[in-house]
Image (cartoon, grey):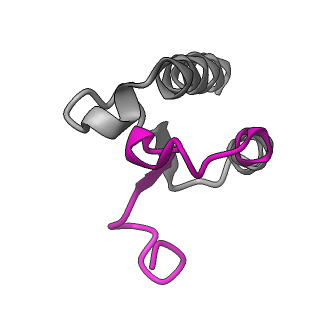
């Protein structure tokens, strides 16, 4: 859609913590690559954070993974 209406639409890319169980390190690689392409209408690293509302995501393993992914995405945001 942003290619069709670049004067009106902007977007952000990111890995939402709600799906942390499905995310892999490869997803971070793909995200970094997409962000490094610096497309005109990509203006933010978005949908990142820590998900505390879903009890299943608060296991030690998934909580650590959420924190690691958040830190990686914050690093990407500072770099762009």
Q: Which of 8 and 42 is in front in this view?
A: 42
* Count of labels in the image: 0
Quadrant for the C terminus in the image: top right
Q: Residue at x 40, y 57 (%)?
A: 10
Q: Residue at x 59, y 53 (%)?
A: 40
Q: Main secondary structure of the magenta part?
A: loop
In x, y percent, where is residue 44? Answer: 46, 38
Q: Which residue is drawn at 54% across and 77% down?
A: 3
Residue 14, compared with residue 68, is above or below; it is below
Q: Is residue 35 left or right of residue 8?
A: right
Residue 49, compared with residue 26, is above or below; it is above
Q: Is residue 53 left or right of residue 67?
A: left
Quarter of the image where one finds residue 51: top left
Quadrant for the N terminus in the image: bottom left
Question: What's the magenta region?
Answer: 1-28
Residue 62, compared with residue 19, is above or below; it is above
In x, y percent, where is residue 53? Answer: 19, 33
In x, y percent, where is residue 41? Answer: 51, 56
Residue extending farthest to the left is: 53
Q: Which of 78 and 6 is in front in this view?
A: 78
Q: In this view, does 27 lie to the left or right of 16?
A: right
In reply to whether residue 5 is colored magenta, the answer given is yes
In x, y percent, where is residue 36? Answer: 76, 41
In reply to whether residue 12 is colored magenta, the answer given is yes
């Amino acid at each position: 859609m942003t290619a069709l209406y670049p004067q009106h639409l902007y977007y952000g890319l990111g890995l939402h913590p709600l799906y942390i169980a499905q995310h892999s390190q490869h997803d971070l690689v793909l995200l970094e690559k997409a962000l490094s392409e610096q497309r005109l209408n990509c203006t933010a690293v978005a949908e990142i954070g820590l998900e505390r509302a879903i009890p299943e995501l608060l296991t030690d393993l998934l909580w650590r993974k959420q924190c690691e992914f958040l830190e990686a995405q914050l690093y990407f945001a500072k770099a762009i």
